[in-house]
Image: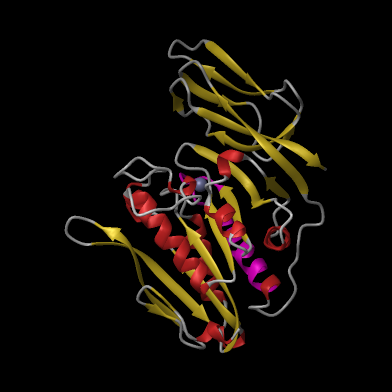
Amino acid sequence: MAKALSFKVGTARARPGAWTTGTLTLGEYPDAPITTPVNILCGARPGPVLWVQSAIHGAECGGALGLLRLFKDLDPKRMKGAIVGVMAANPTAFRLLARNTPYDGENMNRLFEKPSRTAHSRQAAATLIDTAMSVADAVMDMHSGGLDTEVPFYAIYWEDGSPASKRAAELARATGVDAIWRSTDSWLAGAMYTAVTKRGKPAIIVENGSGAELTDRVVDLNRDAIAGVARALGITPGRARPARRILAVGTCDLLYNRRGGFFLPAVEVGTVVRKGQMIGRVMDSHGRIVEELASPKRSYIAALVREHRAIHSGTMCAECCEILRD
Ligand SMILES: [Zn+2]
């Protein structure tokens, strides 16, 4: 794979043994280009290229911080291939720390099934995936809860039995997470990791923490997850160190509230709850508990609204993933 030593992402050009920077243009404001910062850490020798992106949901930028921490740790002279860091995959949403694109209200990570030259988010999605497919051998899409929610440290890949899907499962294990969601959920068919897998290259999501509170621990885990995948791909020396026990989870139920108020979680994210177990309550402005949310099945809590957040009716309060194997 000699290509690793000679490629560009936007204005960033890979240079053997060096950390180079630039920008990738994903659209245009009325008066200026809409760009994301790009960092490339390129090894002295050829090898695979790992694409790592962050903030496709604007507030979810912990992956970018983990990547910077890793780049500062690594010696590119000891690397084969390269790691590309796309810091704000949805730049306009990143500027507002918003989940969706302000210009068209789209969740960009649902548009990759048919990216197109129509609305802004679709054009940006097309540029992003085409660029990733042209330079990279594997893709990591770094996520977290947004400003209102928290998620445990876990990975997702698209399960379709293809070679790319199987490789994605291996890379998910290499992140060091202790839970992996084998996704076949139709509502994720338009996610970028799904589209990349269907185009024949392994891709995973890593979820971790909250967009509202980026602790050192969260940033360290993101750094370690990217480092694990880089080792598994052979970009950096050493062996991947998967967790000893990994929970396999599947189809996810999204739990919505009917009553507004303040959310009082009853469990922690990442725990396994019984069927019917209370996950959280809603307290109204008079101090009364007006709603209790229960898990519809035995499940892994893959997301939860943060403690004491004010929520309106129809807020997505929790993600409950079925347990496939524990
Ligand atoms: Zn996200």
Q: Position of residue 90 (x, y in %)?
A: 39, 54
Q: In the visual, does 81 lie left or right of 166? A: left
Judged from this view, the residue extending furthest toward the left is 31
Is residue 218 visible from the viewing direction of this image?
Answer: no
Residue at left 70%, top 71%? 232
Quick check: is 220 in the magenta stretch? Answer: yes
Is residue 20 visible from the viewing direction of this image?
Answer: yes
- Relative to 121, say whether 242 is above or below: below
Picture quadrant where residue 317 is located: top right
Residue at left 52%, top 47%? 190
- Relative to 214, say whether 4 is above or below: below
- Relative to 20, say whether 180 is above or below: above
Viewer-proximal residue, 243 or 197? 197
Quarter placement of the N terminus? bottom right
Quarter placement of the C terminus? top right
Q: Position of residue 132 (x, y in %)?
A: 49, 67
Quick check: is 225 in the magenta stretch? Answer: yes
Provide the residue span drawn in magenta: 209-231
Residue at left 55%, top 55%? 195
Q: Position of residue 51 (x, y in %)?
A: 53, 68
